[in-house]
């Protein structure tokens, strides 16, 4: 029990200027520890603090990766990640639904499979992407119900798995196009009505 402890060393575990714990050593003998013992415990505490901090960092990275994976998978936008040759390395659920293919059948295909325009766009803009300049284009693809889906695709350079990659995010712009068509119809109608009496 603690009443029997006669000698004690306590060293805070400090990592990145924060106390992450304490390392204690105790003995039932009086005057058991020397300065050399204290120095050894302090050195061990430094190592232990680094290990604790590294474990905390790994946990934070794993949590961030899990959050990113959830956002990636659950996005209502089509998301693909390719290398600079255009080979698909990762794809989310929405993209698989639009292409009517399971994930394992899409990974490994070339981005030109979605539409040849994307491969041409990649080849033409590779140096721009590698300079961290984003770009976008509009394409049309045929969805699982054989409907034409207009997409605005934003393309950017990312680091993925410690390598340079390209992220493609396609947003369905059907509603926006319908609003533009309705606006144009209204403008045409107003122009026609105004010209009539004149």
Image: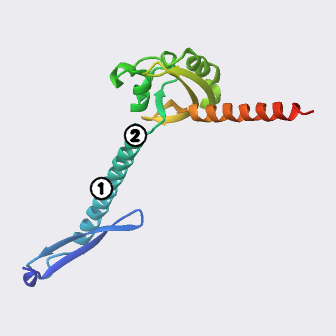
> In the drawing, does residue 89 fall left or right of residue 198?
left
Q: Residues within 10 Å of mark 1 (few under 14, many from 20)?
A: some
The one of 173 and 136 positioned closer to us in this rendering: 173
For the residue pair 136 and 195, the one nearer the viewer reads as: 195
Q: Position of residue 55 (x, y in %)?
A: 30, 53
Q: Is residue 23 above or below residue 189?
A: below
Q: Colour mode?
A: rainbow
Which residue shows up at 42% across the image and 31% down it? 94
Indicate which disc residue 60 carries.
Answer: none
Q: Which residue is identified by label 2?
A: 74
Say which quadrant the C terminus sits in. top right
Could one spot residue 2 in this view of the protein?
A: yes
Task: Give the distance between the C-alpha atoms of the residues marked 1 and 2, in whole angstroms.
Answer: 34 Å
Quadrant of res 31: bottom left
Query: Picture coordinates of residue 37 (x, y %)?
Result: 21, 70
Residue extending farthest to the right is 198
Instruction: Give me the residue at 33% from left, 56% from top.
Output: 56
Q: Position of 102 compared to 141: left or right? A: left
Work out whether residue 21 or residue 104 is closer to the camera in this orientation and state it. 104
The residue that label 1 is drawn on is: 51
Is residue 135 visible in this depiction of the protein? no
């Amino acid at each position: 029990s603690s009443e029997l402890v006669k000698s004690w060393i306590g060293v805070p575990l400090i990592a990145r200027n924060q106390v992450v714990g304490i390392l204690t050593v105790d003995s039932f003998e009086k005057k058991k520890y020397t300065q050399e013992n204290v120095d050894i415990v302090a050195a061990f505490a430094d190592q232990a603090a680094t290990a604790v901090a590294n474990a905390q960092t790994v946990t934070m990275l794993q949590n961030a990766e899990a959050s990113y994976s959830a956002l990636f998978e659950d996005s209502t936008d089509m998301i693909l990640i390719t290398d600079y040759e255009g080979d698909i390395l990762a794809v989310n659920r929405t993209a698989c639904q639009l292409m009517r293919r399971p994930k394992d059948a899409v990974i490994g295909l070339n981005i030109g499979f979605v539409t040849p325009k994307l491969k041409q766009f990649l080849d033409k803009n590779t140096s721009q992407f590698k300079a961290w300049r984003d770009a976008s284009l509009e394409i049309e693809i045929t969805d699982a119900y054989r409907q034409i889906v207009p997409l605005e695709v934003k393309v950017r350079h990312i680091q993925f798995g410690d390598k340079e990659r390209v992220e493609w995010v396609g947003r369905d712009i059907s509603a926006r196009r319908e609003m533009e068509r309705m606006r144009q119809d209204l403008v045409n109608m107003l122009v026609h009505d105004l010209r009539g009496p004149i």
